[in-house]
Amino acid sequence: MTMLDLELTLANLLHALGRDGRSVAEGALDAGRVLTLCESHRRLACGLLLADLDVEGFRRSLARGAEAYLGLLVARERRQDLDPYALCASRALPLMDALAAGHGALARAVALRVTPRWTRRMEPRADFLFFHALACEVKGEALAPVLEEASRVGVSSARFEVLEALVAGDVRAFESALEARVEDWHGELEQQRLRDALPPDAANTEARVCLEAVALFHLAHARGLRPDVPSRYVPPEALPPVEPSEGAP
């Protein structure tokens, strides 16, 4: 990817955000459109970070997407006609966006409204359990029951190993599991690429920054862990600032 490719991608995303933002604001509420808007904000955030190391723009765009998603979840409280597929817990990527933006209050507001039940035939149980676990962590609820359920139904992956390390407070296990998760994430994207299922805007932006890892780093920091950065796809600029140790100048 060249810098020109990235600049063209950013221009396309800004155009899409203007169009989709007007559509969401002016038209009847459509859950799918809101998720598309969130997706564009996510891609723009990654593009800004990659192009200019624009950390503020990165965090601002992620937060805007999460705010749009929060609006959708709030609307669900008074609407019964919204697409349940779009409201599955496993579609709650904007929860990770809010975490990756370092916006704890926004992440909590989203987590409080994420669908707490598995939507059968609409989402893999493993994906539901992962996002349910994230929401529980953000709300300050115990993760152990969710991890026990995952073990009971045979769900096992690097994602859950990261969460287990988080609960145990084991920074080395967290680093190892997160490195494995980043590699799994990259492999999933490569499979999409081979099937021509990875849109160019995604390939140039969010496929180059593992926002899930950034979000998990924020959760680790909130628990007092200070893990090392994975070797790939996690720009240090996107991570929480490291506080100086006692006695440091």
Image (tube, rainbow, N blue to C red):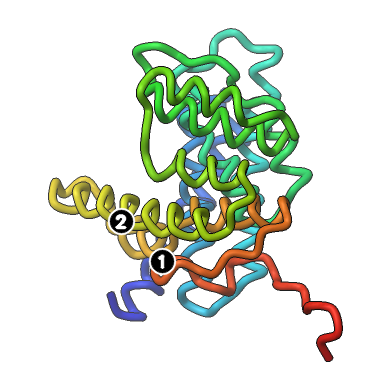
Total marks placed: 2
Q: Tell me which corner region of the image, top left, top right, bottom left or bottom right, holds residue 8.
A: bottom left
> Which residue position holds label 2?
186
The residue depicted at 64 percent of the width and 18 percent of the height is 76
Q: Residues within 10 Å of mark 1 (few under 14, many from 20)?
A: some
Percent across and percent down for residue 172 are 52, 60
The residue depicted at 63 percent of the width and 39 percent of the height is 68
> Which residue position holds label 1?
233
Q: Work out which residue is located at the far left of the displayed protein and give it.
A: 194
In this view, 88 is above or below 57? above
In this view, 244 is above or below 117? below
CB atoms at circles 2 and 1 under 8 Å apart?
A: yes
Q: Residues within 10 Å of mark 2 (few under 14, many from 20)?
A: some
What residue type is disc 2 on?
A: His
Q: Left of 151 or right of it: where is 142?
A: right
Quarter placement of the C terminus: bottom right
Camera-side residue of 237 and 248: 248
The residue depicted at 46 percent of the width and 38 percent of the height is 160
Camera-side residue of 75 and 192: 192
